[in-house]
Image: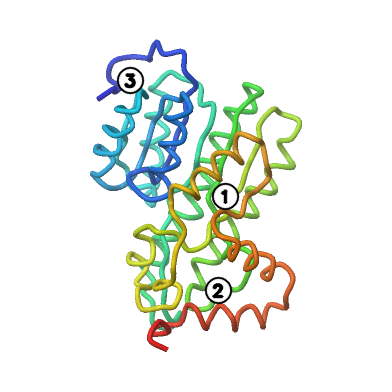
Amino acid sequence: MSTTSMNGPSSSSKPFAVVTGASDGIGLELAKQFAQNGFDLLIAADSSKIQRAAAELEAMGAEVEPVQVDLAEHEGTHKLLAAIEASGRPVDAVAINAGVGVSGRFIETDLAEEMNMVRLNVLSTLHLTKYMAKQMAARGQGRILITSSIAATMPTPYEAVYGATKAFDRSLSQSLREELKETGVTVTTLMPGATETNFFHRAHADDTKLGASEKDSAADVAKEGYEALMDGKDHVVAGSLKNKFQAAAGYALPDPLVAKMHAGMSAPGSAKK
């Protein structure tokens, strides 16, 4: 396994990308997109599966450094930044993708789980984006992809805190895009809908209509996200046409109506109704 931080800076002339949440799901598929398109990679996740992901990516011809860190912890984010610096390579593209969800009635969900989610989805995203944006702006080039969600466009009953974190991610991404447009740095928001990953199980949402619904392929979502990033687009609502309708409804319809519609899909036990 290529570990540039241990062996000194790489001599590779390939472009270099960083992907978080890359052990599986959308993050791993994003990393595959970069590998297929000639990038070397530094990938991060809190799971030991990151080593297996690195081997899979190296088999595609990329030089890969896996970093196992919990980005919900401040020290974990610092460890990732230290690994990026130790690589000795400028980052051409970063996919800030790590995130989790918590589902259920707000008065019954676990506060510790929600605080952990806020630290990962919001604070870590802010920390990494601040670092990468400053580095890229100083070089006059770079691409930033932030994974938000179509949930960012609407109230999200029974996923109240999750939706709020994704609204933060979307707002941050879109705001920075405008700020950085003269610097050579592009910022793109990836907004998937329900995707075939471990997300719903981890969020305790298997018994909801959303959790039980037909979902988009993580590979398809990642391909759309990668292409939007490379094209310098401001955002992409990835996946099925249904996602585009839901995002449009989130923008256009009154919040109380959208909240009621979302509640019907996300309420505990709604899959059985």
- Rendered-image quadrant of the C terminus: bottom left
- Could you tell me how far apart the alpha carbons at marks 1 and 3 are, in whole angstroms? 29 Å
Q: Residue 37, labelled with which disc?
A: none
Q: Residue 156, labelled with which disc?
A: 2
Dot 1 or dot 3: first in sequence order is 3
Q: Secondary structure at mark 1?
A: strand
Q: Secondary structure at mark 2?
A: loop
- Rendered-image quadrant of the N terminus: top left
Identity, as a three-letter code, of the amino acid under mark 1: Leu
Dot 3 or dot 2: first in sequence order is 3
Q: Which residue is mark 1?
A: 190
From this view, report whether residue 58 is shown above or below residue 177: above
Identity, as a three-letter code, of the amino acid under mark 3: Thr
**Snapshot quadrant of residue 196:** bottom left
Residue 232 in percent (x, y) is at 66, 36
Local crowd at mark 1 within 10 Å, few (<14), some, or many (≥20)?
many
Asked if the residues shown at circle 1 and circle 3 are in contact, with their CB atoms under 8 angstroms apart, the answer is no
Q: Which residue is mark 3?
A: 4
